[in-house]
Amino acid sequence: MNSIIENMKTRRSIRKFKGDMIPRDSIEQIIEAGLYAANGKGKQATKIIAVTNKELRDKISKSNCEIGGWQQDFDPFYGAPVILIVLADATWRNRVYDGSLVLGNMMNAAHALNIGSIWIHRAKEEFEMPEYKELLKELGIEGEWEGVGHCALGYVDGEIPKAAKRNEDRVYWVE
């Protein structure tokens, strides 16, 4: 089987990460894969914020936890030391689709590099909050941006989960 297809079939969402930081060159490769995602009309209307700063990572985790309604001590990023936040131009009608493809590419790239990943929601709600709009300004990001999702990255702590059996009633042929 083709190695890319095999990679897609074996990638799983990870819910327990080691605290060890991923090397920057690996993070850069994962981001690059995201930047090459297919996108509507070739607009490239997405941005990625790479968070490796523990203080900011923990602040985002706390906000995400509050939005999700979990107990204060829960980490919705499962201990992952790196968070890649995908934003999309809020005025672009394909923003969620384009951002989703970026996230998918990054998760597959991470798996190819033996790095665990998981997509975590609530970026939309976070980037509607004043403190995260201010973060965008501090980073020099202008315009209207909508959070699509977070790609939490880290080394897997434990075993990679096995794939669930695929449902059989999902493909229909018209020949």
Image (cartoon, rainbow, N blue to C red):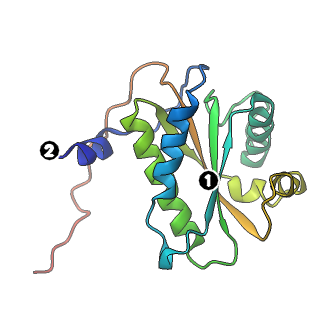
In the picture, which quadrant includes the C terminus?
A: bottom left
Secondary structure category for the residue under label 1? strand
Count of picture labels: 2
**Position in image of residue 124 (x %, y %):** 71, 59
In the picture provided, is 57 more to the left or to the right than 25? right
Q: Is residue 135 above or below residue 124?
A: above
Marks 2 and 1 close (CB-CB < 8 Å): no
Q: Residue furthest left?
A: 175
Which residue is at a point 75% across and 57% down the rendered structure image? 125
Residue topped by disc 1: 149
Toward the viewer: 130 or 45?
45
**Position in image of residue 9 (x %, y %):** 28, 44
Q: Amino acid at mark 1?
A: Gly
**Position in image of residue 55 (x %, y %):** 81, 30
Secondary structure category for the residue under label 2? loop
Q: Earlier in the sequence, mark 2 or mark 1?
A: 2
Toward the viewer: 9 or 133?
133
Which residue is at a point 69% across and 54% down the rendered structure image? 123
In the picture provided, is 158 more to the left or to the right than 153? left
Q: Amino acid at mark 2?
A: Met
Residue topped by disc 2: 1
